[in-house]
Image (tube, helix red, strand yellow):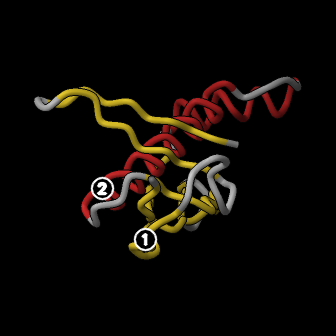
Amino acid sequence: MKFIYLKKTKEGVSIMLVTTTQTVEGKKIIEYKGIVFGEVVAGVDFIKDFAAGLSNFFGGRSNSYEGELIEARETAISELENRAKNLGANAVVGVDIDYEVLGQGGNMLMVTASGTAVIIE
């Protein structure tokens, strides 16, 4: 899985390559900057929880939970990217994304993205 983020800045377009692989095909890693993380803990509100319960009872997909999951994952990856940029990296390799359920009622979702910030040529 490979993600390439393009963000417009005052200076132009900023590119950060984020990949689950340990290397970038056709590129050489010239410097390792360190391990970076992006973490998100998101609560699922009562309405989404209720709608998910109906999906569970009647069958089918829970769009409310899927939406929360997608948003949390994208935010965690964005935080990972920002922390890599702060280290001077232009790529993150070996990205792993973990999901956990937290809280007394299991109504909190934690998404953690981790990887190695590097400079590639």
Nearest-to-viewer mark from 2 and 1? 1
Q: Position of residue 46 (x, y in %)?
A: 51, 38
Is 88 placed left or right of 45 in the picture? left
Q: Position of residue 38 (x, y in %)?
A: 43, 60
Q: Residue furthest right?
A: 59
Q: How many residues crowd around disc 1 within 10 Å: few (fewer than 14), some, or many (20 or more)?
A: few
Q: Which mark is residue 31?
A: 1
Is 108 placed left or right of 119 in the picture? right
Q: How many residues crowd around disc 2 within 10 Å: few (fewer than 14), some, or many (20 or more)?
A: many
Disc 1 secondary structure class: strand
- Residue drawn at 53 percent across, 56 percent down: 108
Residue closer to the observer: 58 or 43: 43
**What amino acid type is highlighted by mark number 2?**
Lys
Res 2 quadrant in image: top right
Separation (CA) of disc 2 from disc 1? 13 Å
Q: Position of residue 113 (x, y in %)?
A: 54, 59
Q: Earlier in the sequence, mark 2 or mark 1?
A: 1
- Residue drawn at 57 percent across, 65 percent down: 102
Q: Quadrant of the N terminus?
A: top right
Disc 2 secondary structure class: helix
Is 56 placed left or right of 18 in the picture? right
Residue 15, compared with residue 20, is above or below; it is: above
Residue closer to the observer: 68 or 106: 68
**What amino acid type is highlighted by mark number 1?**
Glu
Q: Which mark is residue 40?
A: none
Task: Identify the residue under disc 2.
Answer: 85
